[in-house]
């Protein structure tokens, strides 16, 4: 296909998203590879130049795991959430804020954009509370789990984002929240991205992961499900097709859709230009979740 034809095909989508706020959750192993990370951020800056208003929410799971192992700690996950004790919280803060966030802001500048790093206590942006202990079935037994310094969003103050977007900046948000007493909480990046998308009134949320999208059979690439409704998402969870770390992504997607966002896209961030292909082509490259 010639370049002119490609742009012509993209024109309806460019019109659709002109001026739209798009929240992009970036994470997974693609963000560990410097070249892949740079490519993802370049595509996000491209969205800005195409007339969209991108907001980045980033994770850092692989980097956190690597740092924990270097410090002699074994990562522990329950229901897709990282159990966070005092030492793990310090590692999470160090990696997310000191390493990942600052690097993303630098890459935005390198590719011609204006980036600003944000965490929860900037302008009381994310007010959080501790996630309550709960009973979880593990190895066939019901056990009580205290997640430690894992938080849930209590409120989002979108004012700081609106101010930055109105002035041409690309916000890069580390999923760390604070309560009124100044306690710091590790937030699930997928859930935080959904909460932020709803609070800012985004048009769409795009989640870059390590998989192509929701798969009917994860072992077979050709079983990608390109389109899902909320009802179909619940059905796949109940059947066990959606499991482990994909559960928070899907539950967050459902919450976002019910909060008024038109679409949630789950795509493979390891694929070159996956973000642009998903938003500006008819076929897309991942799974798009809508209300109906």
Image: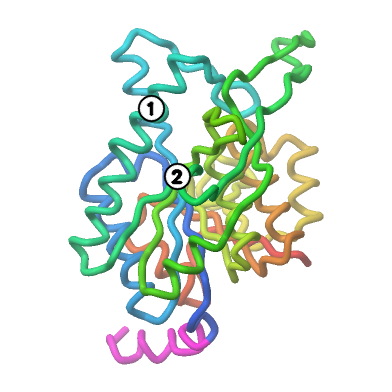
The x, y position of residue 221, in whole percent, is 50, 48
On whether residue 10 falls in the magenta region, the answer is yes
Q: CA distance from mark 2 to mark 1?
A: 17 Å
- Mark earlier in primary sequence (2, 1): 1
Residue 139, disc: none
| Foreground pick, 275 / 166 | 166
Question: Image height check: is 9 above or below 142?
Answer: below
- On the question of residue 210 being in view, the answer is no
Residue beneath the point at 38% across and 31% down = 62
Question: Image height check: is 120 above or below 112?
Answer: above
Q: Is residue 103 left or right of residue 27?
A: left
Q: Which residues are magenta?
A: 1-15
Quadrant where the N terminus sits is bottom left
| Foreground pick, 76 / 150 | 150
Q: Determine the secondary structure under disc 2.
A: loop
Q: Which residue is mark 2?
A: 119
**Picture quarter containing residue 240?**
top right
Q: Determine the secondary structure under disc 1.
A: helix
Q: Which residue is mark 1?
A: 64
**In the rendered structure, are the residues bearing label 2 and label 1 in contact, judged by CB atoms less than 8 Å apart?**
no
Q: Report the predominant secondary structure element of the magenta stretch.
A: helix
Instruction: Look at the image and name its color scheme.
Output: rainbow
The x, y position of residue 158, in whole percent, is 57, 60
Question: Image height check: is 206 above or below 165?
Answer: above
Question: Image height check: is 113 above or below 99?
Answer: below
Residue beneath the point at 49% across and 42% down = 121
Residue beneath the point at 38% across and 23% down = 91
């Amino acid at each position: 296909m010639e370049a002119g034809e490609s742009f012509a095909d993209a024109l309806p989508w460019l019109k659709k998203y002109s001026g739209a706020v798009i929240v992009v959750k970036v994470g997974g192993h693609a963000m560990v590879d410097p070249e892949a990370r740079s490519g993802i951020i370049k595509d996000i800056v491209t969205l800005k130049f195409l007339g969209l208003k991108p907001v980045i929410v980033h994770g850092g799971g692989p980097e956190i795991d690597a740092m924990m192992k270097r410090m002699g700690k074994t990562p522990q996950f329950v229901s897709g959430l990282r159990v966070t004790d005092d030492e793990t919280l310090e590692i999470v803060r160090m990696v997310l804020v000191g390493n990942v966030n600052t690097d993303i802001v630098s890459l935005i500048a390198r590719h011609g954009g204006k980036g600003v790093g944000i965490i929860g206590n900037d302008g009381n942006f994310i007010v959080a509370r501790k996630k309550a202990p709960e009973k979880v079935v593990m190895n066939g037994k019901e056990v009580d789990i205290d997640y430690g310094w894992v938080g849930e969003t209590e409120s989002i103050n979108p004012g700081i984002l609106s101010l930055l977007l109105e002035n041409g900046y690309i916000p890069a948000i580390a999923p760390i929240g604070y309560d009124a007493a100044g306690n710091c909480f590790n937030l699930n990046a997928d859930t935080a991205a959904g909460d932020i998308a709803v609070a800012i009134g985004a048009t769409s949320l795009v989640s870059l992961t390590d998989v192509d999208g929701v798969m009917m059979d994860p072992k077979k690439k050709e079983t990608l499900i390109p389109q899902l409704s909320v009802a179909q998402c619940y059905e796949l969870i109940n059947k066990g097709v959606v499991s482990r770390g994909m559960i928070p992504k899907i539950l967050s997607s459902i919450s976002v859709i019910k909060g008024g966002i038109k679409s949630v896209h789950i795509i493979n961030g390891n694929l070159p230009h996956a973000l642009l292909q998903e938003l500006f082509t008819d076929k897309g490259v991942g799974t798009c979740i809508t209300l109906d």
